[in-house]
Image (cartoon, coloured by chain):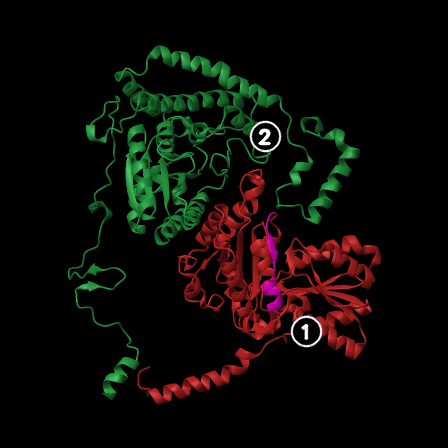
Amino acid sequence: MIGVTRKTARAMLSRGVNATASVRTHMHFKFQPDDAPAELGATEKTNMCNAIKSAIDIQLARDESTIVFGEDVKFGGVFRCTDGLMDKYGSDRVFNSPLCEQGIAGFGIGAAVAGACTIAEIQFADYIFPAFDQIVNEAAKYRYRSGNEFDCGKLTIRSPCAAVGHGAHYHSQSPEAYFAHTPGLKVCVPRSPIQAKGLLLSAFEDDNPCIVFEPKILYRAAEEQVPVGHYKIPLGKADVLREGTDMTMLSWGTQIHVVREVASIVEEELGISIEVIDLVSILPWDRETVCNSVSKTGRCIITHEAPITCGFGAELQATITSECFFDLEAPPQRVCGLDTPFPHVHEPLYMPTKWKLIQAVKEVMDA
Amino acid sequence: MLTRTLRKAVRPLVTSVPRSDKFHPSTQSEFINELHMIDPMEIERLPVYRVMDRSGKILRENQDPKFTKEQCVKMYKAMIKTNEFDRVMYDAQRQGRVSFYMTNYGEEAAQIGSIAALNPDDLVYAQYREAGVIFYRGFTYQQACDQCYGNVDDKGAGRQMPVHYGSRELDYVTISSPLTTQLPQAAGSAFALRRAGEKRVVMCYFGEGSASEGDAHAAFNFAATLNCPVIFFCRNNGFAISTPVEDQYNGDGIASRAPGYGMMTIRVDGNDLMAVFNATVKAREIALSENRPILIEAITYRQGHHSTSDDSSRYRSVDEVNMWQKTDHPISRFRQYMMTQGWWSMEEDAALQKSLKKDVLIFPLVTAEKKKKPSIESMFDDVYDVLTPELERQKAELMDHLKQYGKHYNMDQFVK
């Protein structure tokens, strides 16, 4: 900067940081940790980023064929999820790919076909679209189209997703619905460090191509006592986090923590008993757990960050309405992101906030 | 003392001034001081490697692959069998017996010459115009007909259109319709095989049209940066359906792109079986010993239509096709070589074609036609390794529906 001394520049920068600190650190949710199941043994306080790193580390150690790659993976990843792994396992196993998502996906499929446990990172879920053809037309159909002569079940794609507070159009998307529509894939979204590690370890061993969308805002914001060893959380099973009698609220990822807070508020202030379900797996999804719950409570709110039209909530609402119709006291509702590209300055208004959920709970109860 | 310590501690804005005149570690390029835009026309077009002339005569003795008679006859028969199979299946489609077919006319040497140069367990990825490759490996006509009919013996379980062959046993990955998707996959497989210590090259076939897709760029770049022992074999046959090469690219074909990726390359006469063979042998050797990819561009000519859904007379003259057939047909060039060696005769040729048509080709077709299709329930298998609860539910629902409405569905064609 011309005409500004180093001292003044430093002062300006630090003022800038302070001024924006509240915007940058403001979060629309409060992470609620879970206890690890006792049978999983010793635990350590770990954030989601390090829990993910632990899963990858364990997989690299137990399966010599395992490779981990993507953009900037070698130096540790832009979110530090692979920090130190190259030093530990070598750059033949933990490496950078060129900047090319269709290449990452295609190369990953090929490595899996040839028998390597393949962990491919797409740096932001917003950039997964160049890989869409390889994922949807190739990975998902590999076993089926070859009559089980070939498969790419050893492929896992992991990608940071969802709102981060300032990500706007291209660092905030939740694209799970595009992939839910593709038979042959498995798709899941962890809400916490324990979930992230366990779901990844399941995905690595699952004999189908899996996509794990990791809500990036949780990388540092979410900390739990995470089991240090190897364990798996099953794919395809939803998690009932809180039992209730008046209404089922269904979500996944970061939004689960908003839902949990809303459930506490409406219980305390309005005496409404909410059953909270984390769907966990988008594909295949746990119809039995969800429909049993809604049949019990008679009411349902589905909520997700992705835009409402044809978001995955639409599939849930359609199935719930069809399966639970005669047990319903009120129509199932969705509280989701708006049908706009993910905005920057308007993010707090775009999101399915706890206030929108509280309003929806009241309306559904009054219906 | 303090100054020296500070200078070390402070990270300089630019790396130290280069001592040589080469600019930047990443390019190692010389500086020049005259403005000059490089016109691609300044760069010499890549030459075409050939061993035989158009009448099958070897041009340089030191390039003679020195095939034995047995080797020649095996490769020649493979070309003829591919050719005859194409004729029978094309006619079968015209008669409405098979829904769709794609021929390999004119590209037999590119296919057979290359696959014959590989080990049986080298992993093959292909596009769709490489039937000769899988036949040479050992895929039978019965298996090919079964796939085209999608019957109960189809390795692909009746899931895909005709000519979508594949065989784990023969190390030939089942093909898919989307073009070029196999290229980055081939690079990934080569990486994994190298890491596993397997001395197997990956062979990846594709057409010049396919090379326009982004996946080709991705594959070349990944293979070169990640040391993948893969041969990218481009069949440049002049057309992508109706699109001639003039509309496909403006540069010097496909081979010229390889140096841009730091990849070795060669352009060969695709109708010269010996040239294709020699180049592939060399490519395999380099790929495996140096762990690097090689691009081979085989210049050939698609003598048939793109598929049974295409009539190529709408975009090219019959004269042009006839010219290639008469003056530069891969099968006749090789046959002429064999005949001058005294290893083949026109009588043997006629006998071979006759026996193929009757015994080998018609029988598998008729047999395949009579077989039933895979069971209706099998439609739900292999989406995943095991059926999900939802797939089980949909299967039960469909079978229930068929109990009532089955008579509208021609269910007799499926195995129970």
Q: Residue type at mark 2: give it.
A: Gly
Task: Provide residue B57's location: percent of width, then percent of height.
Answer: 23, 23
Q: Secondary structure at mark 1?
A: helix
Tell me the shade of chain B.
green
Q: Is residue A276 left or right of residue B80?
A: right
Examine the structure image and report whether residue B295 is included in the region drawn in magenta: no
Quarter where residue B325 is shown: top left
Indicate the chain coloured red by its letter: A
**Is the residue marked by circle 2 packed among few (<14), some (14-19), or many (20+) residues within 10 Å?**
many
Quarter of the image where one finds residue A16: bottom left
> Amino acid under label 1?
Lys
Name the disc covering residue A354, or none.
1
- Subunit under mark 2: B
Q: Is residue B405 left or right of residue B157?
A: right
Q: For the magenta stretch, what is the residue range? A: A184-198
Q: Secondary structure at mark 2?
A: loop
Q: Which is more toward the observer, A319 or A159?
A: A159
Note whether residue B48 is visible: yes
Please state the total of marks drawn on the protein image.
2
Question: On the image, numbered disc 2 is attached to which residue?
Answer: B150
Q: Position of residue A50 (x, y in %)?
A: 53, 69
The residue at 20%/46% (across/down) is B42
